[in-house]
Amino acid sequence: MASGRSHDRATRLLSLPYGLLWWPAFGPAGAAIASSCFLFGGLWLSPDLDTISNSTRRWGPLRLLWWPYRRLLSHRSMFSHTPLLGMGLRLLYLSGAMLLLSALLAPLGSPTPGQLAAAAPTLWQHQRPWLLVALVSLEASSWLHLLQDGDPVPRLPRLLRHRRRRRPRPGRR
């Protein structure tokens, strides 16, 4: 299992070459999106957000957003360290936090959650290639992390684990 420093170093080192892979199909804009999303995914949306880690600290005061996520998931659980599922849940969690924040700030003039939800299909319709590049790049950074960890089978979440009950030894009560 790699250290947090090793994860960060690999993410920084590979973000530009990863972005350049997208250049032939999407040009410089696609390469920039791929590279920056790979970097963001590896440094800020790491599978290690389920612990107090470098990626958690990078959020600064907003790291409190990830406290419930850490409390709900044990480290290296199947919900944080599984390809596709891990990043998908982190993105859903972050989206939910943003919708909650927009609901709280709506009286101050921010868009309501309904307005944001109504804009999502339009964004998907008009910017689909760029969004797909971004999502694939976020997931690729997660895969890099998992490969560095040796990609072991993730653990079940605490709530789904069966607790072993100790059997009394013969002759004891």
Image (cartoon, rainbow, N blue to C red):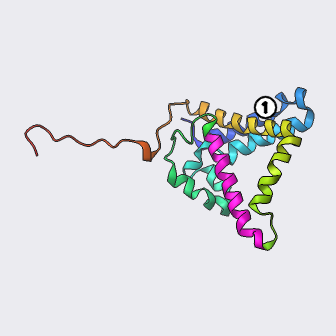
Type of secondary structure dominating the magenta stretch? helix
Rendered residue at 23%/42% (across/down): 166
Q: Up-down: is 25 above or below 91?
A: above
Tell me which segment is drawn in magenta: 86-107
Q: Which of the 4 image quadrants contains residue 110?
A: bottom right
Name the one closer to the observer, 73 or 115.
115
Measured from the top left, where is residue 34 in percent x and y?
81, 37
Measured from the top left, where is residue 129 in percent x and y?
85, 35
Q: Is 153 left, or right, of 137 in this rendering?
A: left
Q: Up-down: is 116 above or below 148?
A: below
Crowd tier of the residue under label 1, counting other residues whose Cα lies within 10 Å: few below 14, some 14–19, many 20 or above: many
Q: Is 78 left, or right, of 12 in this rendering?
A: left
Look at label 1 and name its amino acid. Tyr
Name the one closer to the observer, 5 or 26.
26
Q: Is residue 103 magenta?
A: yes
Q: Is 70 left, or right, of 56 in this rendering?
A: left
Rendered residue at 85%/46% (across/down): 123
* Helix, strand or loop status at disc 1: helix
The answer to whether any part of residue 5 appears in the image is no
The total number of labels drawn is: 1
What residue is disc 1 on? 18
Name the one closer to the observer, 2 or 119.
119
Q: Is residue 72 magenta?
A: no
Q: Which of the 4 image quadrants contains residue 37?
A: top right
Q: Is 146 left, or right, of 154 in this rendering?
A: right
Measured from the top left, where is residue 64 in percent x and y?
61, 61
The answer to whether any part of residue 43 appears in the image is yes
Rendered residue at 71%/43% (across/down): 41
Q: Up-down: is 14 above or below 68?
A: above
